[in-house]
């Protein structure tokens, strides 16, 4: 339970907490179904995509995922569904109880919206510079946009959907094979979203925002400490909590260890892939590989075109391992392996 980076419970009992999460999940599922149906998705499709959107699972009943519908209304209707799956369930519970201030006072929730907005803005700028979604006209809610306005709308539409899908670790895709047309900066921007993920305590994968924020705040705290007298009394604050030196060191070290191990396994898998598949200008590139491995380990499911039945067996096995550790979190896996090796007397 604590391996998800936060140990808060909705109720003192874990059983009661799980029961409440189920009720919240069912409520949001019905809301998502209704929203997608209103946006124009057939009811059967809406039921399936509401479940896989809120659970940030990303599975679809069509080969081309959400791109099948070619509907801006459906794209924008899925955004709040994916965002709901990206927010910690204790925050959902408090908001449903009427405490709306948690949407901006909670550090992670505030940064879910901030991270999605910053990533979308960066990806939009990259895609505009690339000129990937240049179009003469597009109809939006009965209004026809022309020229640069139409291009900007289409670019924002695809950038917003793909970054939210990546950072929420949902895996819905509207941009086709992301490796066939998007440049390296665009692919790496989306890959960064998959590596970080959203809030701990939600349904997402990745490193989790709270760990990234802990690292950033911890590093800044240590750097500022250089300019203070040695006898100065300083307090490290994280998410409204004032931590002692011991607590701060523990939080920082845990975030650093998880992030380091996550990147190590990411690098190992990328190395295996670059040895096993054709690389080069006429084949796959480094950014394609990093994108694919980040997607697997973050339990996202977006693809740059590498994943498929024709993959070498060694890469399939590597992906099985990446997806496994990405879903269970790295620390429980290490505890399991340590217990296994100890039982087999691999080491004392």
Image: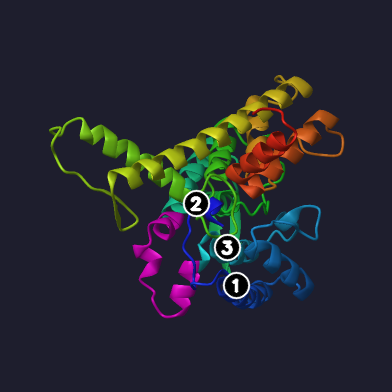
Query: Observer-nearest residue: 313 or 305?
Result: 313
Give the alpha-carbon distance from disc 1 to disc 3, as whole Å: 21 Å
Q: Is 16 above or below relative to 185?
A: below
Counting residues from the start of the chain, the first of labels 1 and 3 encountered is 1
Q: Is residue 93 magenta?
A: yes
- Provide the secondary structure element on which disc 1 rests: helix
Q: Residue at x 60, y 32 (%)?
A: 183
Q: Which mark is residue 85?
A: 3
Q: Mark 1 against mark 3, which lies toward the viewer?
A: 1
Q: Mark 3 against mark 2, which lies toward the viewer?
A: 2
Q: Mark 1 against mark 2, which lies toward the viewer?
A: 1
Q: How is the image coloured?
A: rainbow
Is the residue under label 2 in contact with that under label 1 (CB below 8 Å)?
Answer: no
Q: Which mark is residue 44?
A: none
Give the alpha-carbon distance from disc 3 to disc 2, as whole Å: 17 Å
Query: Observer-nearest residue: 228 or 119?
Result: 228
Q: Is 193 above or below relative to 33?
A: above
- Provide the secondary structure element on which disc 2 rests: loop
- Mark 2 lies on residue: 5
The span shown in magenta is 90-113
Would residue 324 be seen by someone viewing this image from the given angle? yes
Q: Quadrant of the N terminus?
A: bottom right
Q: Is 324 above or below relative to 164?
A: above
**In this rendering, position of residue 182 left or right of residue 229:** right
- Mark 1 lies on residue: 15
């Amino acid at each position: 339970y604590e391996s998800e980076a936060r140990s808060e419970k909705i109720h003192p009992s874990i059983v009661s907490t799980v029961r409440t999460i189920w009720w919240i999940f069912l409520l949001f599922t019905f809301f998502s179904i209704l929203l997608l149906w209103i946006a124009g998705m057939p009811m059967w499709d809406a039921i399936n995509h509401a479940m896989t959107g809120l659970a940030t699972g990303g599975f679809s009943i069509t080969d081309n995922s959400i791109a099948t519908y070619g509907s801006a209304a459906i794209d924008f209707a899925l955004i709040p569904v994916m965002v709901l799956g990206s927010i910690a369930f204790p925050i959902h519970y408090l908001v449903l109880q009427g405490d709306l201030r948690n949407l901006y006072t909670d550090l992670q929730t505030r940064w879910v919206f901030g991270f999605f907005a910053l990533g979308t803005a960066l990806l939009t700028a990259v895609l505009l510079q690339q000129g990937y979604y240049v179009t003469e006209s597009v109809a939006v809610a009965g209004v026809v946009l022309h020229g640069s306005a139409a291009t900007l709308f289409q670019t924002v539409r695809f950038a917003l959907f793909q970054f939210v899908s990546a950072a929420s670790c949902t895996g819905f895709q509207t941009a086709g094979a992301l490796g066939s047309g998007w440049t390296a900066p665009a692919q790496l921007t989306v890959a960064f979203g998959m590596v970080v993920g959203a809030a701990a305590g939600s349904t997402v994968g990745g490193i989790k925002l709270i760990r990234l924020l802990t690292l950033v705040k911890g590093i800044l705290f240590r750097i500022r400490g250089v300019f203070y007298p040695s006898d100065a009394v300083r307090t490290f604050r994280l998410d409204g909590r004032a931590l002692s030196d011991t607590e701060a060191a523990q939080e920082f070290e845990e975030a650093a260890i998880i992030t380091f191990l996550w990147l190590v396994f990411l690098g190992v898998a990328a190395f295996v892939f670059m040895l096993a598949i054709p690389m080069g200008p006429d084949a796959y590139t480094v950014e394609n590989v990093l994108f694919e491995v980040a997607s697997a380990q973050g339990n996202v499911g977006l693809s740059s075109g590498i994943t498929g039945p024709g993959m070498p067996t060694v890469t399939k096995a590597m992906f099985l391992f990446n997806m496994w550790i990405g879903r269970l979190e790295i620390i429980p896996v290490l505890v399991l392996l340590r217990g296994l090796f100890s039982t087999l007397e691999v080491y004392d």
